[in-house]
Amino acid sequence: MGALVLAAQRRIDFDVFLFSNVGDDSEHPGTLTYYHQHAVPFAQRHGIDLRMLWRRKRTGETETLWQRLTKPGSRSLPIPVRMSNGAPGTRQCTADFKIRVIGAWLKAHGATATNPATVGIGISVDEIHRANKRRCEPHERIVYPLLELGLRRVDCMRIIREAGLPVPPKSSCFFCPFHRETAWQDMRRTDPELFDRACALEDLLNTRRTELGKDPVYLTRFGKPLSRVIPDGDQLIPLFEDGAGDCDSGWCAT
């Protein structure tokens, strides 16, 4: 959202802002609420082209990440679940539901290897270590407008507030295994139905893996079901968070 405000202030120059929605059943509801209630009206007031995109199958049907994960008979595990030994599993969700969706839109609107689209990634100075982990397609030229302006996360929050907007929640799927444990606890306390859906997803994945004779997987790194790892109520989590909740792709908020 900080980049959107900067564009309205003419401090950065981007023609289009793209939000690839992995699914209304998959994105955190807070992200979608903020997009519709704040981002869209702000963009319209300032004449900014803000678009929501979705992944579409060859048939033209929309596919959501939740649908792929829960499809009957599916063996797909595109999210970075934790294996029984604590190691992260294969992560395909960002590539399939963010990068390729945005890339397809750029190609459809004229981006080529010889005439690449300039794609701005909103990484701030205090996240500069993430800037060398961007996946770049041949038809894209990745730039970092917040780094060029020397802005930190706190600066972005200030810019958003000064524009009369609330600071948006972190963009992610509600069941993302990159959530910190405190985020899970907040969800269990403030949105128990959403937390229960995440627990049900973990149970479904493990029911399938048991049928296939495979070890269980988890949405946290502690090798136990989510409902047992995350305390109910206001208890403090007796676990040390080592930064495992950081997502280094930069695309989840793109």
Image (cartoon, grey):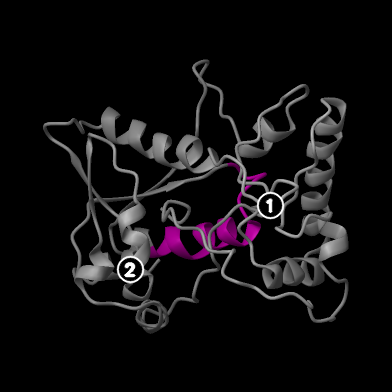
247 inside magenta stretch? no
**Residue 121 place in picture, x, y as percent:** 32, 57
Residue sitting at 29 percent across and 42 percent down?
136
Of badges 2 and 1, the one in the foreground is: 2
**Amino acid on which the number 2 mark rests in the picture:** Ile
Tell me, yes or no, whether the two marked residues, 2 and 1, touch with CB atoms within 8 Å. no
Label annotation for residue 128: 2
Label annotation for residue 175: 1
**Residue 66 place in picture, x, y as percent:** 67, 38
Task: Give the class, few, some or many, for how many residues have Cα within 10 Å of label 1's Cα (few <14, many ≥20).
Answer: many
Front-lying residue, 5 or 92 = 92
Give the overall secondary structure of the magenta segment. Answer: helix
Per the rendered image, the range of residues in magenta is 23-42
Residue sitting at 50 percent across and 33 percent down?
55
38 inside magenta stretch? yes
Secondary structure under the numbered disc 1 in the rendered image: loop
**Amino acid on which the number 1 mark rests in the picture:** Phe
Q: In this image, 126 relative to 189: left or right?
A: left
Secondary structure under the numbered disc 2 in the rendered image: helix
Q: In this image, 174 relative to 231: left or right?
A: left
**Residue 5 place in picture, x, y as percent:** 32, 69
Say if 249 sits above or below 155 in the image. Answer: above
Task: Give the class, few, some or many, for how many residues have Cα within 10 Å of label 2's Cα (few <14, many ≥20).
Answer: few
Label annotation for residue 77: none
Front-lying residue, 190 or 78 = 78
In the picture, the quarter occupied by the N terminus is: bottom left
Residue 160 sits in quarter:
bottom left
Residue sitting at 36 percent across and 53 percent down?
133
> In the orientation shown, which residue stands out farthest toward the left?
114
